[in-house]
Image (cartoon, rainbow, N blue to C red):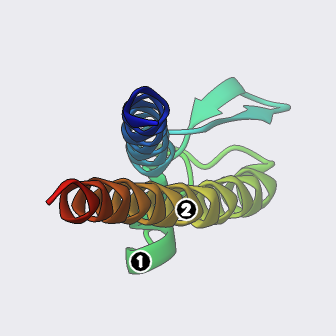
Amino acid sequence: MHRTRRLLLALLGALSAVFAVAGMWLLLHNPSVKSVSMGMYTCTAPYDTALNEPDNVPGGEPPPDADQVEAACIDAGETRFKWGVASGAGAVLLAVAAGVLFVRGDAAAN
């Protein structure tokens, strides 16, 4: 029984770490969108797009499809932000489950 509990504890801890790393990547990695006039355009970070509503219009002389690029950046940023927050919440829940399993295992051993 102890071996199964330790294996489950390790699995929950590893999954929690994977979810946390994935959540951070989703929140911090700048998405790219396709622009007709410019090719690929790199948007601002998803957390910045969702929380601060920055200007995602390409710099310099605005291209003809600047409004479409901004709309695509906002959509991509907000979607990634939602998935990043969900992934972070999953990491917290898995870490709590691992902690409960660890504490209950120690209490049962005593």
Q: Which residue lies most toward the front here?
A: 110
Residue 53 place in picture, x, y as percent: 47, 76
Q: Quadrant of residue 105?
A: bottom left
Q: Earlier in the sequence, mark 1 or mark 2?
A: 1
Residue 34 place in picture, x, y as percent: 78, 32
Q: Which residue sits at x=46%, y=42%?
A: 12
The circle drawn on residue 51 is 1
Residue 10 place in picture, x, y as percent: 38, 31
Residue carrying label 2: 81
Q: Quadrant of residue 35?
A: top right
Number of labels in the image equals: 2
Amino acid at dot 2? Phe
Left or right, 75 with respect to 42, comes to right
Amino acid at dot 1? Leu
Which quarter of the image is occupied by the C terminus? bottom left
Tell me if I can see residue 55 in this picture: no
In terms of depth relative to the viewer, which is nearer, 97 or 77?
Answer: 97
Label 1 crowd (10 A; few <14 / some 14-19 / many >=20): few
In terms of depth relative to the viewer, which is nearer, 6 or 60?
Answer: 6
Q: Quadrant of residue 36?
A: top right
Q: Is residue 20 above or below residue 7?
A: below
Residue 95 place in picture, x, y as percent: 35, 56
Residue at mark 1 to residue at mark 2: CA–CA distance: 9 Å
Left or right, 45 with respect to 73, comes to left
Label 2 crowd (10 A; few <14 / some 14-19 / many >=20): many
Q: Is residue 102 above or below residue 61?
A: below
Q: Which residue sits at x=21%, y=65%?
A: 107
Say which of marks 1 and 2 sits in front: 2
Residue contact at pointers 1 and 2, CB within 8 angstroms: yes
Tell me if I can see residue 44 in this picture: yes
Q: Which residue lies most toward the left here?
A: 110
